[in-house]
Structures are given as C-alpha cells and as structure tokens.
C-alpha cells in the first residue's frame, strides 16, 4: 500500500511540474507574440529639421515603420500656386536626408507618388490644401557590408 501511494505521489508531482513548465512556455510565447504585434504596427512620425522647401505655406512630415523599413513622405501646402516639381524635389531631398541619417543604401518606390486636394470647411475663409505624398521602402543598411567583410577577413585568417 505504501508503494502504491509513493508511486501515485511521484506521478502527481511529475504531472504538476510538466504542466507548470508548459504553462510558463505558453506565457513566454504569448509575450513574444504580443511584442511582435506591437512592433509590427509601430509607426514613428518624424518632422524633419530641415524641410528643404521654398514654399512658406508648406510642411513635410514622414511616417516610418522600422520593422518593414517603409517610409511615407507627406508634403502639404495651402499655397494656391502649388508647384508639383518643387514638391517632388523637396520630398527627394528629405528622403536623402533620412537615408543618410538611418544609414540606408537606397530606396525604392512602393507606389507612384500621388497628389490629393482637399478643402478645409472648418477654417474661414475656406482653405484648399494640396497633399503630395509618396510611399517608399528603404533598402539595405550600410553596416551589413561592413559586418560581412569583417567576417570574411576573420575566416581567411582562421583558415591560414
């Protein structure tokens, strides 16, 4: 009888410890999944210090999704004499500054740049805003090439 109780006690301890480890692993997976979801949807709004614009009514802002290396650039102006060429040059200059600051090699367009005009009915007199925006993906970090060349030189020295 004592042996049977001892065996049942041992099995119950083993079962409880197995479930405790499984529950802890599930909690870790949930935390990792929540962290991934939070990081996946993170978008950073950036107002560049140097706007590169000659239009005094214009402002530029960026939305950066670091997980996907995607950037949306918005050029907004209330100037009735909107010049799309000036907007395009401003957006390109801001993208180049962003590229240098975050050490990307280049960027590629995910969509063609778009132009949208809206009228703000809450402001008197009514103002017409023009929004020029583009959606790009930044390509390649410059430190990746440095790391791979450092690893290659280490492997060459190890092989000799």
Image (tube, rainbow, N blue to C red):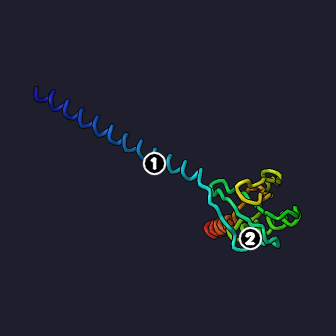
Q: Nearer the viewer, residue 69 or 16?
A: 69
Q: Nearer the viewer, residue 135 or 118?
A: 118
Q: Residue at x 62, y 60 (%)?
A: 44
Q: Quadrant of the N terminus?
A: top left
Q: Position of residue 64 (x, y in %)?
A: 66, 59
Residue identified by numbered label 2: 97
Q: Quadrant of the C terminus?
A: bottom right
Q: Quadrant of residue 123?
A: bottom right
Q: Position of residue 94 (x, y in %)?
A: 76, 68
Q: Residue at x 82, y 65 (%)?
A: 79
Q: Quadrant of residue 135?
A: bottom right
Residue identified by numbered label 1: 31
Q: Is residue 121 placed above or below 76 in the rendered structure? A: above
Q: CA gap, disc 1 to disc 2?
A: 36 Å
Element marked by disc 2: helix
Q: Position of residue 56 (x, y in %)?
A: 79, 72
């Amino acid at each position: 009888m004592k042996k049977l109780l001892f065996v049942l006690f041992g099995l119950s301890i083993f079962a409880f410890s197995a479930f405790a480890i499984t529950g802890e692993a599930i909690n870790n997976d949930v935390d990792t999944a929540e962290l991934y979801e939070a990081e996946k949807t993170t978008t950073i709004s950036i107002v560049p210090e140097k706007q590169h614009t000659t239009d005094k009514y214009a402002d530029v802002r960026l939305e950066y999704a670091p997980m996907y290396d995607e950037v949306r650039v918005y050029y907004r102006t209330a100037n009735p004499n909107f010049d799309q060429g000036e907007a395009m040059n401003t957006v390109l200059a801001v993208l180049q500054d962003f590229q240098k600051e975050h050490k990307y090699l280049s960027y590629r367009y995910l969509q063609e740049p778009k132009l949208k005009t809206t009228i703000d009915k809450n402001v008197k007199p009514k103002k017409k805003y023009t929004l020029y925006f583009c959606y790009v993906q930044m390509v390649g970090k410059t430190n990746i090439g440095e790391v791979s060349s450092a690893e290659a030189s280490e492997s060459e020295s190890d092989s000799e």
